[in-house]
Amino acid sequence: DSLPKGYNVRKRKRGDCLMQRTKLFSAILGRLIYILVTSMVILLAGGGAAFFNKSIGACYLILWILWWTITFIGRRKGEDTIYNKGQKMLVIISGIVSIPFLIYIPVWEYSNFQGPIPRDGVLAWAGIILFASGIIIQSVAMWQLKGFYTVRLGTQPEQKLVTSGLYRFIRHPGYLSYIITIIGIGLSLSSILTLMFVIFIVFFEVLRIKGEEEMLLKEFGDEYKAYMKRTKKIIPFIY
């Protein structure tokens, strides 16, 4: 007996569909585990319930969970392009260095030291506002790029240059949001080490932006040159 016409095609499609669903489930599960584990580390480093019972601690933890939830939803992995090859090591080093400064150090410093930045004061609430502002800017930047906000450096065939919204004023609002977020984390938890870490972040972003703009000039040519002339990189009217 011969198989029905198109049986192998349908079987292959079902297999591809199952594989895609498995990958999606694995990705979602991995991200949920990351948020759960990092939140637990923050709580433990901050002294457990004592950290969450403080207004600053509770707001910080809520913003932390919100930040990574939005990041995981809005940021894509992207394709491994020729532009990304020269950036891999830079991203890996940045990621490794960032882990303690994002997850453990600010909370540990908050719970174990006093000063020179007063705990739970005006500056701490200013930090919470900056943290929230960074999340908002990042969310808007992701939404306005419509799925082209990626970890890997590269463009897609159907991608068009976005010059509206936040991108009307600066070319890299996502990088600005990250700097604002880190400053917010440092101030909210009175962490001198995290505020010093901002210097590393700026250095990383300058290198990252250099590679990204070289790519965009090759991909969009004169359109991107004209866009560069009327906008700044990450700080409106300044830089």
Image: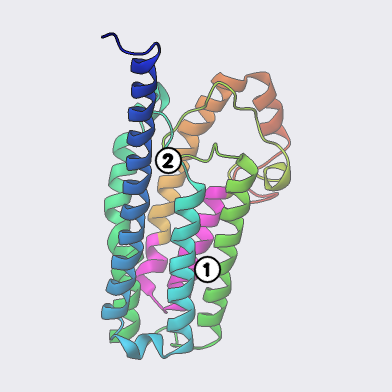
Residue under numbered circle 2: 151
Instruction: Name the quadrant containing residue 46.
Output: bottom left
Which amino acid is tagged 1?
Phe
Q: Magenta span has 194?
A: yes
Q: Which percent across, then down, holds residue 133?
A: 60, 65
Q: Secondary structure at mark 1?
A: helix
Q: Is residue 139 above or below residue 76?
A: below
User: What is the distance, in whole Å, between disc 1 and disc 2 at their CAs?
Assistant: 21 Å
Magenta stretch bounds? 174-197
Instruction: Name the quadrant containing residue 227.
Output: top right
Residue under numbered circle 1: 131
Q: Is residue 31 above or below residue 19?
A: below
Instruction: Name the quadrant containing residue 122.
Output: bottom right
Q: Which percent across, then down, holds residue 186?
A: 43, 71
Q: Which percent across, then down, holds residue 147?
A: 55, 39
In the rendered view, does 14 fall on the left or right side of 230?
A: left
Q: Is residue 114 visible?
A: no
Which amino acid is tagged 2?
Val
Q: Which mark is residue 10?
A: none
Rendered image coloring scheme = rainbow
